[in-house]
Amino acid sequence: MRIAFIGLGVMGYPMAGHLQKAGHQVCVYNRTPEKAASWCELYGGERANTPELAASNAEMVFVCVGNDDDLRSVVFGHEGVLAGMSSDTVLVDHTTVSAQVSEEIAEVAAKQHVSFMDAPVSGGQQGAEKGLLTVMVGGDATVFARIESVIRCYARAVRYMGPVGAGQKTKMVNQICIAGLVQGLAEGLHFAKASGLDPEAVVDVISKGAAQSWQMDNRHKTMLAGDYNHGFAVDWMRKDLSIVLDEARKNGAHLPVTALVDQFYAAVQQIGGHRWDTSSLLALLEARSPVKKD
């Protein structure tokens, strides 16, 4: 299949690579041309100078950029993907954005007979590189049947969630759950150290019971080592939680813990942790109440 992939960040770069390795004909666009050139050297495929040119010969166009404004910038306008897409093609957005912008794009795309699907992902850079992402999809169910096998090139789980916007709202639930889990894990490790316990031994035993989580399994070692220069950046998490809290104001959901953790992440940014992994909530606890060492 002829595919365009727009956005070669830490997620998009390997995702587009999986598509090319699966035998699809992939043309990429990235606002930094050098990144697109390096992708082509690694995977083959082609690159284009604008989103419009990348999409001009594609049956499906995939986008994975930063936020609502980034998405609008590569979709709309005379050099956006919609300017190059033909009727009966499909535009799939993997960016985590607001449900509102997804609905906005879907409405415009429909006028030129292009199907739009919002399909945010979970699993982080590691999941993208290993092809083990989880994808939550909103849009037309018949179109989902067309794109599911393509998405499975880089996903272990793909689920249709409902009409346009349902994918983004499901991703919001994902981020709500992660925020609380990471704060709980950070507080647990902090408490273990303050109590004079061996935190590794504590995690070893409690991870066999009801406290077990992906965050515990994959982040406790780096948290205890004070290593946060990896993973999903605090800046991006705050962007996501801003979307969550805005949607909650619209639908009436009460999210006190999520709002509180968002404030904690703001404090992490204030101590220089903009690009730290979200597990750096432990660093904030230690900065505020350092555990005395023997």
Image (cartoon, rainbow, N blue to C red):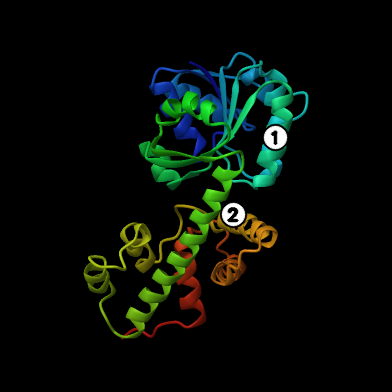
The three-letter code of the residue at mark 1 reads: Ile
Q: Quadrant of residue 158?
A: top left
Q: CA distance from mark 2 to mark 1?
A: 19 Å
Observer-nearest residue: 174 or 132? 174
Observer-nearest residue: 245 or 21? 245
Q: Give the left or right position of residue 184, taking residue 51 as reference.
A: left
Is any part of residue 50 visible from this angle? no
Give SS at disc 2. Answer: helix
- The circle on residue 83 is none
Q: Is residue 127 above or below residue 257?
A: above
Is any part of residue 263 visible from this angle? yes
Badge 2, how many Cα within 10 Å: few under 14, some, many 20+? many
Q: Is residue 78 above or below residue 227?
A: above
Observer-nearest residue: 102 or 285? 102
Q: How many marks?
A: 2
Q: Give the left or right position of residue 280, taking residue 73 as reference.
A: left
Give the residue at mark 1.
Answer: 105
Give the residue at mark 2.
Answer: 240
